[in-house]
Amino acid sequence: MSEARAAVRKFIEDFWGKTRPLSDDEDLFDATDIWGDEAAEFMAAFVARFEVDASGYLWYFHHDEEGGSIGALFHTPITRRFGRIPITIAILTEAVRTRRWPVVYPEHELPRRRWDIVIEQIISGTLLLLAVAVGGWIWFAGQSGP
């Protein structure tokens, strides 16, 4: 086992605790059921620990965002547009060895606007206004007395 590979395995164990044995090509996030903020925290800690230049890292190819989105029911979220690329021990080992993020991403174009998020904001704003209106109506009805 190379020094870099051993260091990656130790880092994974330190970060997540004992996990079942993982192959070098297994998707770490899938195998450990990690996504969203935990996946982002893992990658930030990995980059800091091994001083990897991750300026080319594109999270949306590797894991979903935190939480579900009602807007995703109406419009495809960014994490499902381009296909998933697993984060593996082999990729992390190469990053440690070269101190650079080794994944070459396919050509793609980001949308100008995240419609899944815009839809989510519209729904949330509408529900908030409805709650305020109902609360105001209840308050007003209580003030008018018998």
Image: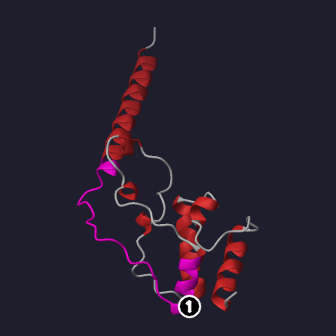
Q: Residue at x 40, y 41 (%)?
A: 70
Q: Nearer the viewer, residue 100 or 47?
A: 100
Q: Is residue 5 above or below residue 27?
A: below
User: Percent x, y for residue 146?
Assistant: 46, 8
Type of colouring: secondary structure
Q: Is residue 44 left or right of residue 105?
A: right
Q: Quadrant of the N terminus?
A: bottom right
Q: Residue at x 61, y 57 (%)?
A: 33
Q: Is residue 100 above or below residue 79?
A: below
Q: Nearer the viewer, residue 86 or 43?
A: 86
Q: Which residues are magenta?
A: 90-118
Q: Nearer the viewer, residue 142 or 101?
A: 101
Q: Which residue carries the number 1 mark?
A: 97
- Pick out the residue farthest to the top: 146
User: Percent x, y for residue 96?
Assistant: 56, 87
Q: Residue at x 39, y 27 (%)?
A: 136
Q: Is residue 58 left or right of residue 115?
A: right
- Pick out the residue farthest to the right: 18
Callout 1, which amino acid?
Arg
> In the structure shown, which secondary structural element does the residue marked by tag 1 occupy?
helix
Q: Nearer the viewer, residue 105 or 123?
A: 105
**Residue 17 belongs to the span the image colors magenta:** no
User: Percent x, y for residue 64?
Assistant: 47, 57
**Residue 115 belongs to the span the image colors magenta:** yes
- Pick out the residue farthest to the left: 112
Q: Is residue 16 left or right of residue 134?
A: right
- Quadrant of the rendered structure where residue 11 is? bottom right
User: Percent x, y for residue 95?
Assistant: 52, 85
Q: Is residue 109 above or below residue 94?
A: above
